C-alpha cells in the first residue's frame, strides 16, 4: 500500500526447551544438569527450578514464561521460533503497547514493563530473560 511502511520482524530466534538443551548429549539427567551448571557457573538447584518451570533456551540464554495468556503449556521444539516482544508489538500492533495489552487482557503498564525487560514472544506468551551468559557482568 502506498504511503505505508513495510513492517517486518527484525530477528527470529530459535528456541528449544531448556531441558532438551541441557540433556543434549547426555543420558543421565543429574550429570547433564551438573555439566550445564558448572559450564555457566550457576547452582544445579537453579537449573532444576528452571527446567521444572518450563524454561526455554533461546540465543544462548534462559527465558522463563512471564505471561499467562492461556493455561496450556508452551511447547518449544526444534523448529520453534520466537521474536523480540518489541518487534511483535511494532509489527502487529503498530508499535502500540496499549493495543497489545488490551488484546491479551493485561495492563498497559505490564506491557511496558515487559518491553523494558529482555523479553521475547513465543507461542502467544511472553518470556523474560533470566541469564546473561557471555555478557560482561557489572
Image: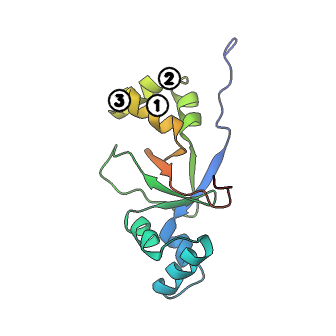
The image position of residue 82, as x and y in percent, is 56, 49
Q: Inspect this view and state whether residue 105 appears.
A: yes
Question: Which residue is denoted by mark 3 in the rendering?
Answer: 107
Which image quadrant for residue 135? bottom right
The image position of residue 97, as x and y in percent, is 47, 26
Question: Which residue is denoted by mark 1 in the rendering?
Answer: 112
Which image quadrant for residue 100? top left
10 Å neighbourhood of mark 1: few (<14), some, or many (≥20)? some
| Lower sequence index among marks 1 and 3 | 3
109 shown above or below 54: above
Element type at marker 1? helix
Residue at point 50%, 66% (across, down): 18
Residue 10 or 43: which is nearer the viewer? 43
Element type at marker 2? loop
The dot on residue 96 is 2
The image position of residue 67, as x and y in percent, is 38, 45
Amino acid at each position: 500500500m502506498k504511503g505505508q511502511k513495510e513492517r517486518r520482524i527484525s530477528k527470529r530466534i530459535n528456541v528449544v526447551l531448556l531441558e532438551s538443551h541441557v540433556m543434549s548429549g547426555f543420558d543421565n539427567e543429574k550429570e547433564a544438569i551438573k555439566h550445564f551448571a558448572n559450564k555457566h557457573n550457576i547452582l544445579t538447584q537453579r537449573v532444576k527450578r528452571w527446567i521444572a518451570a518450563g524454561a526455554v533456551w533461546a540465543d544462548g540464554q534462559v527465558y522463563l514464561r512471564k505471561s499467562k495468556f492461556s493455561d496450556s503449556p508452551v511447547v518449544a521444539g526444534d523448529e520453534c521460533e520466537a521474536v523480540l516482544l518489541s518487534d511483535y508489538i511494532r509489527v502487529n500492533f503498530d508499535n502500540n503497547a496499549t493495543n497489545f495489552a488490551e488484546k491479551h487482557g493485561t495492563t498497559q503498564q505490564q506491557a511496558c514493563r515487559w518491553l523494558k525487560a529482555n523479553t521475547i514472544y513465543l507461542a502467544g506468551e511472553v518470556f523474560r530473560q533470566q541469564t546473561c551468559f557471555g555478557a560482561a557482568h557489572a
